[in-house]
Image: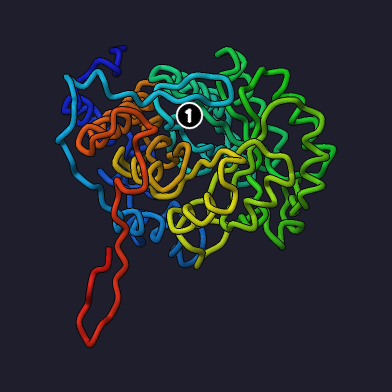
């Protein structure tokens, strides 16, 4: 397998297109493996909310932010552009991660991540090989200096999504972030301790899982066990008191929610609307980023996901106050197309794009990516004419 960190950008783009071609029959019909995913219906069936508007809004609002080009500065041959970042004591080549998604063959029935000889039971994707899938994520992320996130899901006696992910993390020296659902306290405690034993860098919980279709208000009627419920800041602090690892709350969408995360003792948050799956008609994640940063200052690390597809998108988030970006669906498709190699190609392409955006805006390090490096556009109707206010 080639070292993608030494590939030219145009080579990466060619490889990316080839990987998408390989993935397309494996992710159909739910996903078309588009060159650029915008979550739009009817071509995209990945977002499970009925209208799917929030997922589209995530992407569209990112396109309304523009970069300030400025190449008059003391530069060099490109080696001076430094995207390195720290993540709770672990160094990364750039603050770009995969977003956690589990039960891969439930998402893609024709996925190649299937356990040999296993069959579906009662219509459930019990043949899903989430160990092979999470192994591809963790290895692919590590190959480009990133850290992989793994997910949790409903309990089924024939599949072990969370445990499979932890196995991958442990095999790679703890270079991963397990993400736990909001189960009852006893179940969460067990899973937190399992993450500790795997040596995970940090532990996360996606607090907005309480709105997902199979975990929402009618989940008690599901044949699969596993009920989730919202928890207060006090309850979250108590359940995570069993670990000394930094923990991250994923699913924050308001300044008040971010303040509560600080009260809960969280070390970080992920601004996320679960790709629009948990609550339709919500704001885009990028729309709430600046207000959340103002509310908590530097008290907590802020990560974000939702519609991010390119390195320029990552640059926008960093300029508006984020510490890093998680990318979901494209990385999942990349794994389907070429396993760990596909993941590394996808992420390295984004890293090169981030570096080029920095080069073209006069930023030699991440600290140089400040608010004045981007323009945010607001469209207003003035006297019958559409005006653009910067």
Tell me: residue 49, above or below residue 90: below
Task: Name the quadrant of the N terminus.
Answer: top left
Q: Residue furthest bottom?
A: 383
Q: Measuring 76% from the left and 49% from the top, which residue is drawn there?
A: 233
Of 284 and 52, which appears nearest the observer? 284
Secondary structure type for disc 1: loop
Tag 1 residue: 113
x, y (%) of residue 134? 52, 26
Question: Is residue 28 among what the camera can see?
Answer: no
Task: Name the quadrant of the C terminus.
Answer: bottom left
Left or right: where 68 falls relative to 251: left
Specify the quadrant of the image occupied by residue 347.
Answer: top left
x, y (%) of residue 337? 34, 30
x, y (%) of residue 260? 70, 51
Q: Measuring 68% from the left and 45% from the top, which residue is drawn there?
A: 262
Left or right: where 9 falls relative to 220: left
Specify the quadrant of the image occupied by residue 167.
Answer: top right
Q: Residues within 10 Å of mark 1 (few under 14, many from 20)?
A: many
x, y (%) of residue 55? 43, 57
Of 308 and 339, which appears nearest the observer? 308
Q: Measuring 64% from the left and 58% from the top, which residue is drawn there?
A: 256
Of 50 and 2, which appears nearest the observer? 2
Question: Is residue 262 among what the camera can see?
Answer: yes
């Amino acid at each position: 397998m080639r070292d993608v960190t030494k590939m030219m950008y145009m080579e990466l783009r060619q490889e990316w297109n080839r990987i998408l071609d390989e993935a397309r029959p494996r992710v159909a019909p739910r996903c078309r493996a588009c060159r650029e995913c915008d979550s739009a219906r009817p071509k995209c069936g990945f977002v499970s909310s009925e209208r799917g508007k929030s997922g589209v809004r995530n992407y569209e609002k990112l396109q309304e932010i523009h970069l300030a080009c400025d190449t008059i500065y003391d530069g060099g041959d490109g080696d001076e552009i430094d995207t390195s970042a720290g993540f709770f004591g672990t160094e990364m080549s750039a603050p770009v991660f995969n977003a956690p998604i589990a039960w891969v063959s439930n998402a893609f029935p024709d996925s190649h991540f299937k356990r040999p000889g296993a069959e579906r039971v009662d219509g459930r994707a019990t043949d899903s090989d989430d160990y092979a899938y999470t192994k591809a994520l963790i290895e692919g992320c590590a190959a480009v200096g990133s850290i992989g996130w793994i997910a949790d899901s409903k309990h089924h006696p024939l599949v072990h999504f969370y445990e499979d992910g932890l196995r991958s993390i442990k095999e790679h020296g703890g270079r991963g972030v397990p993400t736990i659902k909001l189960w009852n306290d006893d179940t969460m405690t067990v899973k937190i301790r399992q993450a500790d034993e795997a040596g995970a860098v940090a532990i996360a919980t996606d607090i907005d899982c309480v709105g997902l279709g199979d975990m929402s208000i009618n989940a008690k009627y599901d044949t699969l066990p596993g009920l989730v419920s919202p928890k207060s800041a006090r309850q979250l602090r108590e359940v995570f008191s069993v670990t000394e690892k930094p923990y991250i709350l994923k699913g924050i969408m308001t300044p008040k929610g971010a303040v509560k995360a600080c009260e809960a003792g969280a070390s970080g948050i992920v601004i996320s609307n679960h790709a629009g799956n948990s609550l339709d008609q919500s704001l885009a994640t990028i729309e709430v980023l600046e207000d959340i940063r103002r509310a908590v200052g530097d008290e907590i690390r802020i990560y974000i996901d939702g519609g991010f597809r390119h390195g320029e998108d990552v640059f926008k988030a960093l300029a508006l106050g984020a510490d890093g970006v998680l990318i979901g669906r494209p990385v999942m498709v990349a794994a389907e197309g070429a396993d760990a190699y596909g993941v590394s190609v996808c992420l390295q392409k984004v890293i090169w794009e981030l570096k080029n955006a920095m080069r073209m805006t006069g930023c030699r390090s991440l600290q140089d990516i400040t608010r004045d490096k981007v323009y945010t556009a607001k469209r207003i109707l003035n006297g019958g004419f559409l005006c653009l206010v910067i």
